[in-house]
Amino acid sequence: MTVTNFDAVVVGAGVCGLTAALCLARRGLSVEVVARQLPPETNSCAAGAMWGPFMVSHPDARRWADESLAAFRELAADRSTGVAMVRGVEASAGLARPHPWLYSTGDVELCEEVVWPGYRSAWRYTTAAVDMPVYSEYLLAALSAEGVPVRAREIGSLGELAGVAPVIVNCSGAGARSLVDDPNLVPVRGVVVVVANPGIDSFFTEDGAGPELTYYIPHGDTVVLGSTLEAPGAPVLPESLVVKRIRERCGEIEPLLRDAPVLSVRAGYRPVRPQIRLEATTLDGQAVIHNYGHGGGGVSVSWGCGQDVASMVEACLSRLY
């Protein structure tokens, strides 16, 4: 064990871990981040990603999402962050209504005519589209500016970090299943295809539950096409077939995408849990704050959760000193 002068050590360098660390640092706390994988190798960097209510559950999720949307609106003023506000369409194969979260965007508009094949209802709104590899680099740069070290380190258990800092913040995402022995967390694999942007400036997303989802999200010169929802134990299809299906589905919605050159294929695991775990606990006397299980909505609630984590750490430190 190495005792340090840090107030908190954050485990995990996905979007929730990096954001929580930044929230802590901006409150004047001394922080370090340790993670098995660093960007661009994290699961977060494989995501689409777009603000919205996808596979997220918690009584406070709407508040966290609203706080995060406000943060993304500010970040979108600087395109180097990888964040942009984009208007587009969400469609459902059934007769559905927009999720209550979406009204926080302030511009939800029901589509009187549904012209997309296979769908019966649709609505438009403007949301934050987040280019995750670029955004992760922005978060790393912001942490560096705050003097926060981010280190690659394999952690077998949180007990290995006992005494390193007064508070451990567990943002281990899909890794929490083994790290803290949480059988309620299910890593759900997803595949996306990145293509050269043929001139698309709006998104399309499907209101559905998989196992295949149709969406495309423009990120400047590229467009991310999705996706799959592959639960553990499900047959893993050949990548070539998955890519073919994704491209075909997106091409039916937007013909410009049919011949767009494929630049890369990304795959990652969504940390799906019946409910996000955001709570303060102890482990053999060590203060631990858990912040994981964000499903497909880690980006969407990242800033709200990060601010709550910072408040919890401050409360822990006030009790200790």
Image (cartoon, rainbow, N blue to C red):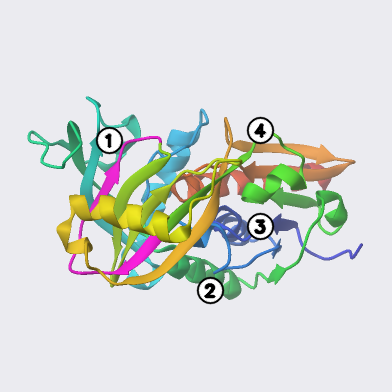
- Callout 1 secondary element: helix
Q: Which residue, given by chain and number where applicable, does mark 3 sit on?
A: 12
Q: Nearer the viewer, mark 1 or mark 4?
A: 4
Magenta extent = 193-209
Residue 306 at what x, y percent from top left?
56, 49
Q: Which residue, given by chain and number where applicable, does mark 4 sit on?
A: 184
Between the residue at mark 2 and the residue at mark 1, the CA separation in whole angstroms equals 32 Å
Residue type for callout 4: Asn
Instruction: Answer few, some or many: residues within 10 Å of disc 2's Cα (few below 14, many 20 plus, some between 14 and 19).
Output: few
State which tag comes first along the sequence, 4 or 3: 3
Residue 124 at what x, y percent from top left?
19, 42
Residue at horizontal 30 percent and vertical 41 percent from the top = 206
Q: Residue furthest top?
A: 95
State which tag comes first along the sequence, 4 or 2: 2
Residue 295 at what x, y percent from top left?
52, 42
Residue type for callout 1: Tyr
Q: Tell me: 281 left or right of 118.
A: right
Residue type for callout 2: Ala
- Callout 3 secondary element: loop
State which tag comes first along the sequence, 3 or 1: 3
Q: Are marks 3 and 1 in contact (CB under 8 Å)?
A: no
Between the residue at mark 1 and the residue at mark 4, the CA separation in whole angstroms equals 30 Å
Q: Are marks 4 and 2 in contact (CB under 8 Å)?
A: no
Q: Which residue, given by chain and number where applicable, does mark 2 sit on?
A: 141
Q: Which residue, given by chain and number where applicable, does mark 1 sit on?
A: 103
